[in-house]
Image (cartoon, grey):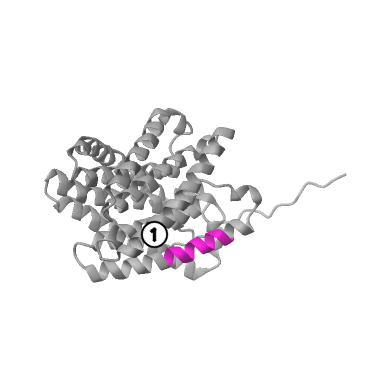
Amino acid sequence: MKRAPIFPPPQFPPVKLRAFQRMPPAVFPAIMGLFGLGLVLRRGAEVIGYPSAFAEMVLGAVSILWFFATLGYLLKLRQRPAVIMEDLAILPGRAGLAAMSLGVLLLAATLFPYSLAAAQGLMFAGLAVHAVLAGLIAMALARGPAEGRHVTPVWHLNFVGFIIAGLVAGPLGFVGLGKGILIGTGAVAAGVWAISLVQLIKRVPPAPLRPLLAIHLAPASLLGTVAYLLGMQGLATGFALLGGVILAGLVGSARWITASGFSALWAAFTFPLAAYAGLLLVLATTDDRWAWPGLACLIASIGIVPLIAAKVLQAWSKGALAAKTNAATA
């Protein structure tokens, strides 16, 4: 007669984790969305004319939040450095850690009006950090199962996220660098869009992963904004129209995309929407026809981004986010 398997008895009292031992990377896309909201509020102040103090307060608060969360993950990494590869082995971890490293570039954009030297230093540091992370992600994908190597919208964060550096490269005088980033990331984004479209036609993505489709809006928005800052207004307009098509598709299929209910992956709705609002508002500085769509997206960002971010941060504060996103333990 076959014996039933013997499992060890549960520990009592339960093992208490050390501080940040299971810090969830999934909190960072929501923080990225808040960064995007602050930057688009700053842009809106320039275009619409309301006081910019609120935007700067938001950016200041989000910067502190990003510092705290990043410190938390670095403390987790210090406890067991190999934990980063375990986090990168799963989709929420790859998205979260990419958003964490891109926070350096967003911080550069935040500090640009205050210190050109700080913005420049953070831009190059952010490019270096994200390049290292992209290499680790490529390594994790190569080592993982074949089914985990399928192209997903998260690849935009992983391999196209360098485009955020373009928000400050051109204004800082690094026009050649800005154009190089625009061309390189634009080619990668086009590849991800094309492959994702074929995949979407061939098979229906699982309901829990559908919110990630919103990330497709982010590259169009950022590529357009960087193109505008580099003096390529026609290209920027083209990306704005492409973004409009993607946004219309997302809005039209909103019920289908959100069918599985709220999860931390809803943070994917935040930063793309804010980025698209920013593109429309920057175009409105020279063409008034973009002002009203830009204002509409700005209002939508103000209503959606903080609400989703608050729910993700609340789950983090209660300790539920790590379990729900399968974060690794140091």
Foreground residue among 174 and 115: 174
Residue with the mark numbered 1:
181
Residue at 43% of width from left, 29% of height from top? 253
What is the span of residues highlighted in magenta in the rendered image? 129-139
Image side of residue 3 versus residue 275, left or right: right
Query: Is 309 in front, or is 271?
Result: 271
Residue at 30% from the left image edge and 42% from the top image edge: 237
Q: Main secondary structure of the magenta part?
A: helix
Which residue is at 60% across, 50% downward?
149
Q: Is residue 19 visible?
A: no
Is residue 241 in view from this perspective? Answer: yes
Q: Quadrant of the N terminus?
A: top right
- The location of residue 199, given as percent across then percent down, is 56, 38
- Residue 136 in magenta stretch: yes
Against 241, is 19 above or below? Answer: below
- Residue 157 % position (x, y): 44, 52
Using the image as rendered, state which of residue 101 and residue 260 is in the foreground. Answer: 101
Q: Position of residue 166 (x, y in %)?
A: 33, 58
Task: Look at label 1 and name its amino acid.
Answer: Ile
Percent position (x, y) of residue 195?
Answer: 54, 43
Quadrant of res 57: bottom left
Total marks drawn?
Answer: 1
The kind of secondary structure element at disc 1 is: helix
Q: Is residue 163 positioned above or below 125 on the image? A: above
Residue 83 relative to residue 147: left or right: left
* Disc 1 crowd, CA 10 A, few/some/many (<14, 14-19, 20+): many
Looking at the image, which residue is at 62% across and 53% down?
A: 10
100 magenta-colored? no
